[in-house]
Image: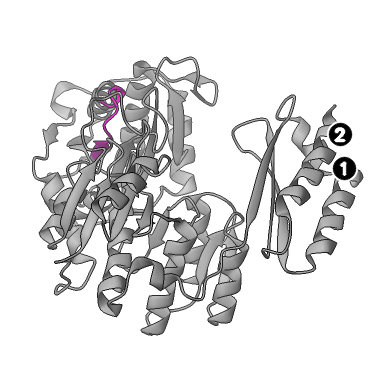
Amino acid sequence: MSRRYFGTDGIRGTVGEAPITPDFMLKLGWAVGRVLARKLSCHEVRQRAIGASRPKVVIGKDTRISGYMFESALEAGLSAAGADVSLLGPMPTPGIAYLTRTFRADAGIVISASHNPYQDNGIKFFSAEGLKLADDVESEIEAELDKPLETLAPDQLGRAVRINDAAGRYIEFCKSTVHNRLELHGLRIVLDCAHGATYHIAPNVFRELGADVSVIGAEPDGLNINRDVGSTHTERLRERVLERRADIGVAFDGDGDRVLMIDRHGNLIDGDEILYIIARDLHGRGKLNGGVVGTLMSNFGLAAAFEKADIPFERAKVGDRYVTERLFANDWLLGGESSGHIVCRHVQTTGDGIVSALQVLAVMVREGVALDALLEGFEKAPQALINVRLPHRDAAAAVMQSETLQQSVAAVEDELAGAGRVLLRPSGTEPLIRVMVEGRPRFDVQAMARRIADSVETLIA
C-alpha cells in the first residue's frame, strides 16, 4: 500500500477491488486516522504535551487538479477519526518526508502520481521518521477499510490547519544538505520543473545559492504536469541549455523525487551517471561508508566502474522501496535507479531530486570542473530494451519458464562471455515481458535482444 496510482474517474484504477473515488479517499483517511489513534493510545512512542493525544498527519500534493479534491476528502476522513491535519499545499514528495519529521507528525501523506499525466493520481505514505510505513501498519489500514465508517462525537473530531511557511522550511532544508559555504556564483543553470511540485521550490534554492537560473516548466495549471517537460521529456531542456550556453540543465519529475541532467554539450546524464558522480566523490573523501545499491536495470557499465574503483555494488529489484530496503539492510548510504530516483541517506530519508542535484553541483564546484568531466572512469554500456506484449499478465510465468526461451537467453549470454548481461523481467503493471541486453560496444546488443524477443513472440503466437 506504499504507493497507489489510479485514474481519477474511479474506473481505470483500483486499490484491491475498490474503485478510487472521493468517497474511497475519505474512507482511507478515516482508516489511517483510526490506526494511528489506536497505536498512539497503546504505545506512547514519543513524549507529548498534556492533552495532545490526537494523532497528527501532514498532507501535501503535487500540482494536478484532482489533488484538491482528494486532499479535501482525506482531510475529512482523518478528522472524522479524530486526527489533526496539517495541509502543506503543493510540495515535492521528499519535502513532505522532511516536514513529517519536522512537525513531529505521526504520518505524512503525498497526493501525487509522480511522472504520470494529470489524469492519474495516487498516494504515498510516510512514517513519523520520513520512511515508508511498516508492513504491519499498512495491513491494519487495509483491514480498517472493510469496516463501516463511524464518525466521532463533535468534541473528539480532529482539527485542520494550513501551514503557510512549508515551502520556505523545505527550501532551507535543501540548502542545508550541502556545505554552508557552497556558492554557485558564475554557474548558469536551467531548471525544468515539469509544471509540478518543484515549481516554487527549486528556482529559489538554486538562486539563493548564487546561480544564474533560467526556468522552464514552472507554470502549472492543474492539467499540464509532465506534459512535454520534466525528466520524462528532456528535449526542451536540452534546447534551452544549448541556447543559453548553460553549464548544466536539471530536470525534475512531477513530484520532485527524481532528477536527470543535461551537460553543457547537450548530453543526457541519467540516474546511473548521477549515482556514479556522488558515489565517487563520497568514496574519495572517505564518507561513503560501504557500497552502493542500484537495481536490475542499472547499466552494466556502472557495475564495472564501481568494481574498478573498489566500491561494493549490489542490485535490488526495480523500485525505490527495494533500493531503500537494501540500503538499510547493508547500512549503506547511497542508492538509486537509472530513472533518476537517488537516495542519499546521509542527508535525506528518501529520493530527492533537488538534494541529489545539489550533491552533483557541490562536486562540480569542489573539483572546479564541468559536469561531463566528472564521468571519467564510467563507460556506459550500450543497452537494448524490447517490450513484448503478452495476451494477458498470467501468461508471463509460463513464458519465463520455457526451456526454449532459456536456451535463447543462454546462447546470448555465451556470446557476451561476461562482457555484458541479459535481463528478462515481467512488467509489474502491464501484460509485458521486458527483454534487455547490454554489453561492450563491440556487441550488437539490439540484434541480441531481438533474437530473445522473437523467442518470446513465438511462444505466445
Q: Nearer the viewer, mark 2 or mark 1?
A: 2
Q: Residue 459 shows which numbered tag?
A: 2
Residue occupying the point 36% across, 26% down: 118
Question: Percent from the top left, x then y, of residue 413?
Answer: 80, 60
Amino acid type of the residue that numbered disc 1 sits on in the rendered structure: Ser
Reply above or below: 405 against 440.
above
Residue 134 lies in the magenta stretch: no
Quarter in which the C terminus is drawn: top right
Reply above or below: 375 against 453.
below
Badge 2 vs badge 1, beta-carbon distance below 8 Å: yes
Q: Residue 76 shows which numbered tag?
A: none
Q: Secondary structure at mark 2?
A: helix
Is 447 displayed left or right of 459 in the figure?
left
Q: Residues within 10 Å of mark 1 (few under 14, many from 20)?
A: few
| The residue stretch that appears in magenta | 58-67
Which one is in front, 108 or 418? 418
Residue occupying the point 39% across, 34% down: 113
Is 208 displayed left or right of 264 in the figure?
left
User: Disc 1 designates what residue?
Assistant: 402
